[in-house]
Structures are given as C-alpha cells and as structure tokens.
Image (cartoon, grey):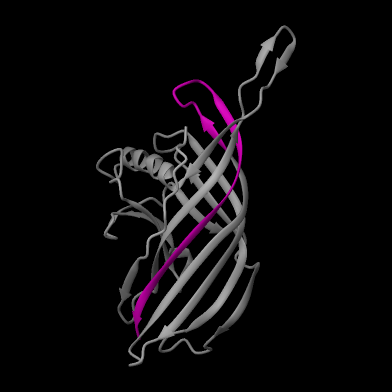
C-alpha cells in the first residue's frame, strides 16, 4: 500500500518584511511503520486472525494521498503533485495557531494548502518545558534562543475528500529556535528545527474499494527544519 521511500529535507529560506508575521518554511519528513489488521477467517465457530500486514508511511506516500484528496476537494489541478514536490510546515513562530501544512514545488513556490487533511497540533498548549533564553521586550522583535518540549499530535484524515485513510500519531515534539542578528542590526536570521520522536499511534482504512474497515497501529518519527531572514 505504501512505498518505502524517504523524502530528504531541503533547506528553505524566506525573507519577512518588518511588521509581517514571522514565518519559517520547514520541509517536513515522516517515516513510520504500520501493522495492519488482517481480516480473520472463520471456520465453523472459530475465527482465526493471522499476523498483521506490515508496511511503511513516508513523506512520498503521504504526498501521493494528499494530491488525490486536494484534487477531489478542488484545491489542486490533478491527482498527483510534481515529482519533486515538498511537504512543508509553515511555522508562524509568533502565532502558533496560524501554522499549517502546504505543498511546494522544488523552487519553494506554494502549490496548495493541505491543512484540511493534515494537521500538527500540541496535545495541550499549557504543558510544555522551555530551556534557553529570549529577550523580554517584544520591540523591535522578540529574539529567541531556546528549545521547547511538548506532547504533539499529527493527524491525517482524507475521508471527507474522497479518501479512505485516517492516521493519528502522537509523540514528543522538541523545537529549537535560534535567532542571530546581522552585523548591520537591520535583520536577523531565525532558524527552527522540530523533531517529533517516540511516536506511536493508530488509524483506520475505510473501504479502499471494498466494504471493509481495517485498523492498524504504527510507530515512527517526523522532523522539519528551516530558516527565515526577518527585517527589524
């Protein structure tokens, strides 16, 4: 079902103007192993469930399903993305709730948003640990050099857009933010790295062309990294 192909992270750099949101484009990578429930066979009054089927979830396979869902939703022009398309987390570092997933081409141009199908959320925004330092004044900008650790959740659900797959992955999200001011004090470079580790979860496969419903468990990890040059 899924092809065992990993997508390498690319480096994206964007420039933000003064007063605009602090946005860091972070190419996103996922690798997970899933164990799919195999339908039981019934003989007389005995039902026998064989070993689960093992497969992989990768960024490339996820992009394949996202393209079909967005085409069904009318947000994309075909049922596939360009071969070198990237899944990108747009991290609004000054407004977490505005952050969302998009797909870009190889040059970093946005093709479409996929936030209607794929979301990354904090399981509880009040429970997190911060290590490091930041400036106490928000003007001209709040400068940060620290790491946050929290419980995160990645949710994929295309069942409202012609698909049949639900994935719910939970794990430890560690994000490092590092701001470096330029020598002329006119800009600063904000570098952000997120590692989503110790991930476990499950999901469901509805139908897939048949009147079946299959459950699965999965383990894996995700990561994203990017930077932005921001003007004071």
Residue 141 percent coordinates (x, y): 42, 85
- Residue in the foreground of this view, choosing between 218 and 98: 218
Q: Is residue 215 above or below residue 201?
A: above
The furthest residue to the bottom: 184
Give the x, y percent position of residue 185. Answer: 36, 92
Above or below — where is 5 with respect to 47? below
Q: Looking at the image, which residue sits at the far left?
A: 77
Q: Nearer the viewer, residue 77 or 126?
A: 77
> Residue 36 sits in which quadrant?
top right
- The residue sitting at the top extreme is 44
Q: Quadrant of residue 39?
A: top right
Q: Which residues are magenta?
A: 203-232
Picture quadrant where residue 187 is located:
bottom left
**Residue 83 horizontal/vertical position (percent):** 30, 45
State left or right for residue 180 relative to residue 84.
right
Query: Is 191 contained in the magenta span?
Result: no
At 52% from the left and 55% from the top, the residue drawn is 222
Q: Is residue 53 above or below residue 4?
A: above
Figure quadrant of the C terminus: bottom left
Is residue 227 found inside the magenta-colored segment of the image? yes
> In the displayed structure, does residue 105 sit left or right of residue 177?
left
Residue at image point 53% right, 72% down: 176
Q: Residue at x 47, y 84 (%)?
A: 143
Q: How many marks?
A: 0
Percent coordinates x, y for residue 98 in the rendering: 43, 64
Q: Nearer the viewer, residue 17 or 95?
A: 17
Identify the main secondary structure in magenta: strand
Q: Residue furthest right?
A: 45
């Amino acid at each position: 079902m899924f092809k065992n192909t990993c997508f390498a992270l690319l480096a994206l750099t964007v420039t933000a103007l003064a007063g605009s949101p602090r946005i860091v484009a972070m190419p996103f990578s996922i690798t997970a192993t899933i164990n799919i429930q195999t339908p039981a066979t019934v003989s007389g009054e005995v039902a026998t469930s064989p070993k689960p089927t093992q497969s992989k979830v990768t960024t490339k396979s996820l992009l394949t399903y996202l393209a079909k869902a967005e085409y069904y939703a009318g947000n994309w022009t075909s049922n596939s993305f360009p071969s070198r398309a990237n899944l990108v987390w747009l991290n609004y570092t000054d407004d977490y709730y505005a952050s969302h997933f998009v797909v870009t081409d190889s040059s970093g141009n946005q093709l479409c948003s996929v936030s209607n199908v794929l979301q990354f959320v904090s399981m509880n925004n009040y429970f997190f640990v911060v290590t490091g330092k930041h400036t106490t004044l928000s003007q001209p900008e709040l400068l940060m050099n620290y790491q946050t650790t929290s419980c995160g959740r990645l949710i994929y659900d295309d069942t409202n857009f012609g698909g049949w797959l639900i994935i719910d992955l939970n794990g430890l999200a560690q994000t490092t933010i590092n701001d470096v001011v330029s020598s002329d004090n006119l800009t600063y470079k904000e570098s952000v790295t997120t590692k989503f580790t110790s991930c476990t979860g499950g999901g469901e496969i509805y139908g897939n062309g048949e009147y079946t419903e299959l459950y699965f468990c999965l383990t894996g990890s995700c990561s994203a990294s990017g930077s932005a040059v921001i003007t004071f």
